Amino acid sequence: MAVGNHSGLRGHWLRLCAATALAGAMSSMVGALPAVSQELGALVGQDIPADAQLLLEADLLTYDNDLDTVTASGGVRIEYGGNRLVANQVTYNRQTGRLVARGGVELIEPGGLRFTADEIDITDDFAEGFVNALRVETVNKTYFAAESADRKGDRVTVFNNGVYTACAPCEERPDRAPIWRIKATRTIWDQKEKTVRFENSRFELFGLPIAYLPVFEIPDPTVERKSGFLVPSVRISDELGVGIRVPYYFALSPTYDLTLAGTYYTKQGFLAEAEWRQRFNNGMYTITVAGIVQQEPEAFDLNTVDRGPDGDLNEERGMVGTKGEFLINPRWTFGWNLLAQSDKNFSHTYGIAGFTDYVHRDEVYLVGLHDRNFFDLRGMHFRIQEEVRDEFDSARDEEQPFVLPSLDYSVIPDEPVFGGELSIDVNARSLYREELDAFNFDPLDPDPERDPFVRGLDGSNGRVTGETEWRRSLVMAGGVVVTPLLHFQADAGYTDTSNEGEDRLNDLAVRLNGSPFYTGDTVEADVLSSFNRYMATLGLELRWPVLFSSTSATHVLEPMAQVFARPDEPYVEDRLGIPNEDAQSFVFDATTLFERDKFAGYDRIEGGTRANLGLRYSGSFANGWTANALVGQSYHLAGLNSFDQPDLVNVGAYSGLESDVSDFVALTGFATPFGFSMSASGRFDEESFELRRGEVKAAYTRDAVSVSGLYAYIQAQPLYGFDEDRHEVRTNASLRFAENWRVFGGATYDLENEFLVSDRIGLGYDDECFSYTLSFAETRDDENDEAERTIGFSVSLRTLGDFGTDQSLTR
């Protein structure tokens, strides 16, 4: 029955209402398990409004004057202040001040915390209580269960013979053990400290006990930040030994924290680490510090940074690193990533989190983005975290540049200019390099027929480039799209290199041109110390997309032609003295066929008059298949061919563009509705159609199966140090079975030299609360090298943490 405003029961029922209000907030009693971070009394006093209405529904309401109790029974439902209590019977005893709910008790608080129990017996001030057969589901889907629970005082709840897990119960078999769980004789929740302590506990995986833990403490699973020990990890290395890392986390405030970690390596001793993190409303920064006094530096190989220079052993090693990013306003972002260390390989060797990259880039940057305007200003320094000492020719760290600074600015006005689109770009860089970055592949046995590469001049050099482009597309009769284009670029730069750099450049110039261009104080040297370049381009593009359609397919054929008229590239004769820092990587294929300037960066400018011709196709079929293709060729029509002119790295060699008629380039591909796709691309000799460069990709992904493969071919390129053709096959596969299990693997095979470059295989499991991977991998530098083998595993337990290790098996 529903309880209304009966005058005979009003006085007593108001007391029951008050007690039921506490029962409605009873989530703070079991919600204390570890879900609520407020004081219980504060929860009742603050979270429930003073004018909150109470709703009670029950089949029967009984008042016992002798026992001074009020009992609601039969489908009892109480709602108060957003809390909901459901039970078969609820009794309030005025004399003892206790409230008892029995039979299918379920309590849900406003935040979503859910409690179920057979019986709840608690005082009306929630200071003391007892719960029978308790089950708790927290808002972040973690689960507690216990035979019984006692509440002592106003802050501690003790669960007897309890279980904790973050794995949801199996709906089909709720009695089946979860993937993992912690069973404990006593589980103690301290509301004030926000910790859960397990005593006499064991950790079970798939229902099997795998670890006994006399005492184990974790933060409240719903508390995002809590001081305490984090999950330890293990690392094994031939040079370091076996290392056990134990981190401790300090939650100092809502906006900053500190993590201290100690790792003891059986060979090298104790590594200390500290990470400070602080967050603001508009960004955050971190500071990482690490150091060690190595016990056995002689465990490292000779002639390595890790071991130390000849006669000395590298004992004291350390680093300081910092990262940060701040949003100045919705348009501007400022940030940095900086590393200072005792030697160039410390962070890589000891795996300092966030600073382990083999190529580390120190940088400070300012980035702006608004509509179609982009600004990027940054200072950078590239460093190689390699073990080779700098005095050896194979070391590259000292050859990496300081870029101080690099600037990119791009703007596209919102309004059309003469009916077309105008774009303006500015690029500038200034860099300094301590050592000349040059090689001719074998310093001990140089090949006089092979040109030395100069990847970077020592000393300083810089360049400022400004360019603007205007284009407008016009649709003519018959559907022909005509796009005129105007482009202008201007550069100013300087070079200040050392005598060693001049000697190497002269050597290269003699081989290529028959005479040096650095001759002391002559005009040629003065010209190369600074330069100004200009390039104007007049372009025209024609496209004629033609649509063919039927009831089952749609096809679009699009012949396309481009002509770009421009003068020769400036400083062709003296270009060997102009640095090429950002245009060294260049591949001519179908994706770059219709580029106005096919060089990758600003340091090289494409000159001369050129035409590009091609045919594009796209198709869509009613059965869900799609297809695409492109084939074309480029023609040098007048002036000097920039791709046939040498520079410091011979960037145009073997490109397929060094002749007046380029190689053919093509690509084709298709995709199916059942997850299979395939594509092929290649470059073919313009006369013999011999394959110069090719690539075939295939992939299949559907349901539990994922397979991909790649075949790549590159013809021999002696000037680049590749005297033989390169054929390589790469494969990757993954198969999921039994819902959550998967096996995966992959391999790379060198077809030309007939050896397995790398291979890996692994087993994994993952679901919403647990993931695990075990992998084995091998790598080889060439067919004669012994394989480097590693085995690794990683385990992730939701709410508990992640840990794992990689171990080298090579001895």
Image: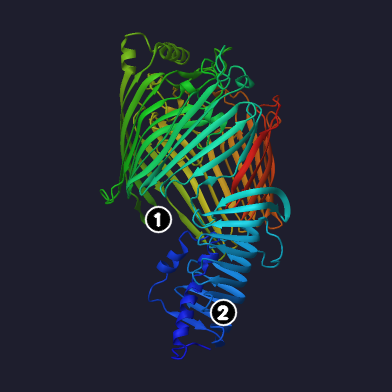
Q: Residues within 10 Å of mark 2 (few under 14, many from 20)?
A: many
Q: Position of residue 734 (x, y in %)?
A: 67, 49
Classify 82 as above or below 291.
Answer: below
Residue 303 percent across, percent down from the top left: 59, 17
2 or 1: tag closer to the N-terminus: 2
Amino acid found under the numbered disc labelled 1 = Gly
Q: Picture quarter containing residue 93?
A: bottom right
Side (left or right) of 660 relative to 75: left
**Which quadrant does the C terminus fall into?**
top right
Q: Residue at x 35, y 20 (%)?
A: 495
Question: Residue at the spot x=32%, y=25% of the render?
Answer: 493
- Label 1: which secondary element: helix
Q: Where 74 falls versus 651 (above or below)?
A: below
**Could you say which disc has been placed on residue 90 in the image?**
2
Name the one closer to the observer, 238 or 303: 238
Residue 659 visible somewhere in the drawing: no
Image location of residue 64, percent across then percent down: 56, 86
Q: What element carries label 2?
A: strand
CA separation in Å, label 2 and label 1: 81 Å
Is 811 left or right of 458, judged from the image as shown?
right
* Residue under pointer 1: 479
Instruction: Identify which amino acid the numbered label 2 is placed on.
Output: Val
Give me the disc on residue 40.
none
